[in-house]
Amino acid sequence: MEPIAHLVKVSVPNYLSNLPIPDSIGGWFQLGVKDWFSLIPPTAVLVGIGYMSYLSFCPKARKGNCKRVNSKIKLLNNKVVDVLDIENITENVAFCRCWKTKNWPYCDGSHAGHNSKCNDNLGPLVINKKN
Ligand code: FES
């Protein structure tokens, strides 16, 4: 515990008190290159804390890359689950993995339109009937 107490009570306050923060706005223009470089680490820490706070408290920021995939299949269900016994497969069958088909759970080729439009490479899961 003592190292942490020393860090909080002595090291950090000494470090902060030695930063070249001017007393007036005009003082910022009198800082030298070395002074500006010494302000980079604490500025980076403050920006990091601000960004982490933004991510924590702003719901829109967390959704960033989260985009709904399923826009039309069983939308009232909490989770779309389909079960098919492998013994019941009587012919080769392709299951949709792109969520664009109009014949769920089977592939109807709709992935091709998505792929050409979005430069993507989606495709079905094909189960071949055992001969
Ligand atoms: S339509 Fe979805 S994988 Fe073919």
Image (tube, rainbow, N blue to C red):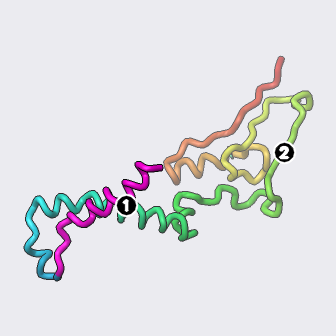
Where is residue 81? Give x, y as percent.
82, 47
As rendered, which of 113 and 22 lies closer to the eye? 22
Q: How many marks?
A: 2
Against 53, is 125 above or below? above
As rendered, which of 23 and 99 lies closer to the eye? 23
> In percent of the image, x 91 and y 27: which residue is there?
87
Mark 2 lies on residue: 82
> In percent of the image, x 60 and y 43: which residue is there?
122
Q: Residues within 10 Å of mark 2 (few under 14, many from 20)?
A: few
Q: Secondary structure at mark 1?
A: helix
Q: Residues within 10 Å of mark 1 (few under 14, many from 20)?
A: few
As rendered, which of 13 and 57 lies closer to the eye? 13
Q: Which amino acid does the dot numbered 2 rest on?
A: Asp
Which of discs 1 and 2 lies nearer the camera? The answer is 1
> In percent of the image, x 63 and y 47: which residue is there?
111
Where is residue 46? Give x, y as percent.
36, 65
Where is residue 96? Give x, y as percent.
72, 43
Q: Distance from label 1 to label 2 (Cα)?
A: 60 Å
Check if residue 31 falls in the magenta segment.
Answer: no
State which region is magenta.
1-23
Q: Secondary structure at mark 2?
A: loop
Against 36, is 118 above or below? above
- Left or right: where 57 falls relative to 75: left
Q: Residue furthest front?
A: 2
Check if residue 14 falls in the magenta segment.
Answer: yes
Mark 1 lies on residue: 9
